[in-house]
Image: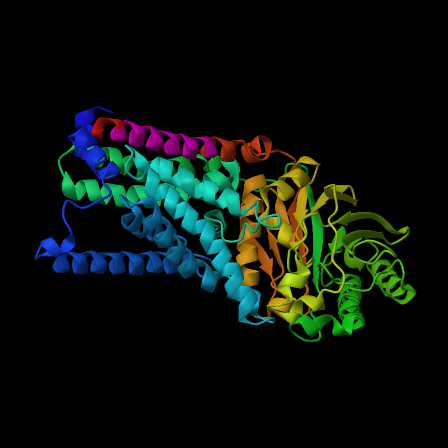
Amino acid sequence: MSSSVTRAAGNEPADPSAEARAEVATEPAAPPSAHPAAPAATAKRNGAWLVRALCAAVAGVLLYLSFPPRPLWWLAPLALALLAGCLRGRRARAGFGLGFLAGLGYLLPLLVWTGEEVGPVPWLALAALEAVFIGLTGLGIALVSRLPAWPWFAAAVWVAGEALRARVPFGGFPWGKLAFGQADGVFTPLVALGGTPLLSFAVALCGFGLYEALRTALDHPRRATAALAALTVVAPIGAALAARPLVSDAAEDGTVVAAVIQGNVPRLGFDFNAQRRQVLDNHAKRTEQLAEDVKAGRVPKPDFVVWPENSSDLDPYSQPDAYAVIDKAVKAIGVPVAIGAVVAPETGPLRNTMILWDPVKGPTETYDKRKIQPFGERIPMRSVVRLFSSDVDRVRRDFGPGKDPGVFDMAGSGIGMVTCFEAAFDDAVRSTVRDGAQVIAVPSNNATFGRSQMTYQQLAMDRIRAVEHSRTVLVPVTSGVSAVIRPDGTIVRQTEMFTADALVTEIPLRSTETPATRLGPLPEYALLVLAAAGFGWTLTRRIRARRAAA
């Protein structure tokens, strides 16, 4: 891009020395009191800051509103366009503050379900911690916002922020990725091309590009720069339309009939498992009722059945009564059943385990959940956390993580287990598909979160995973919403919340790997390199500016 075009876009000053003076100036030419207009100027600056702070918080709220259960995915680019208007041209410290405010506006309502049963302290602490990462993202966007073609770098910085909070602290918390709010959006096919990082990048690029296109169109309505800025909006939409052929629900390896069981729980909240036997009995009885419906010809006989996570909080290996209840239900339906159980070995941590239960052989293969939820299934820094909430002692014994993916051979089909919280992690889902899963099962337990929006946020996440890897996704949940999702992300069957039910559906089997499945983390790494290049370019410009000023 020529220097004249760059200057016209407002990305580089016409006089390099002007930038040098702006970068290195630290002291005013005279004390503010020497200028009669100083108080008015200060008031104006303070007013501008308040407006930007309010707009940043509103941008965060709009981003929250773009997530399910509302089908308002298109609010996400608008929210980021508003945030871009707050961040562009700001200093790093202001970028962090504005990003943090946007993060609070976004995450406080999005994560309110985390305090459903334990009060506001864990919810506020988690939202504030995650908002710090968005603050760091805002800092990074502010740094690269003076570069030519800055929306591309800023969108890559957003992905870098998501990558960071998906990994730290305590293994990360990817909830709230931009990609997970786009299940009904026009950008969704891109997830099959480059995974959730590419989908998040496209949404961010469209938002930042929208702001830049409007800004340059107003400042330079007849300049080529307005058209160039508009490309940042057109490019992700065009790429998404071009990627649509990657989305298919064709049955490559035939079809099977799958059943998803939702047994329901005796009561809401943490106390739901105070009647553990009742939870197990609910799922066993609903399976036996399904067997009766099959015999009566009301529903087709399934080839296999999947129960939810924690459908048996009693260890069937050590408690004969739990074993007998499960075995009776499995023999009644007469097909393999995946059982979610809490396994309590004599020593070591608990295991959140899916057990493949055969009607003849009994329990055979197992899969131990690999991504253990911090402060839910394990308590890091227990003695410190106890100072803020005694609810940590509800988790008396931590769960330990498994090591390997779990793909069960159920009636000749490869059914991959991705337990609840794991669906938020790119590597957990991808490794299961790479290990041979023709269908993905996401057994979950949302009973502790009541009737909150959590289950709908997770369901949207599962829809994104279906498109990303072109697999049917089965979602059995103890209390709802359970669902069957086609490989194109369409929900074909779903239950009501807190209702015992069974979903019996013919589903396609697929074995083709999408580009996202094959490439794995490579698209994310490429976007991290782009973000790093933006930071490097910014640093180089500042060094040159300081030298010129000297």
Q: Is residue 278 left or right of residue 89?
A: right
Could you tell me what secondary structure mostly forms the magenta stretch? helix
Q: Nearer the viewer, residue 227 or 57?
A: 57
From this viewpoint, is residue 32 visible? yes
Which quadrant would the C terminus be assigned to in this image? top left
Q: In the image, residue 466 lies at what x, y percent?
A: 58, 46
Rendered image quadrant of residue 3: top left
Rendered image quadrant of residue 530: top left
Q: In the image, residue 210 lies at what x, y percent?
A: 29, 44
Which quadrant would the N terminus be assigned to in this image? top left
Up-down: is 387 above or below 402? below
Residue shown at 63%/43% (left/top)?
429
Residue located farthest toward the bottom when viewing the structure as drawn: 267
Q: In the image, residue 142 lies at what x, y percent?
A: 33, 43
Q: Nearer the viewer, residue 36 or 540?
A: 36
Residue 545 drawn in magenta? yes
Q: Which residues are magenta?
A: 528-546
Chosen colour scheme: rainbow
Residue shown at 45%/55% (left/top)?
131
Q: In the image, residue 73 lies at what x, y percent?
A: 41, 53
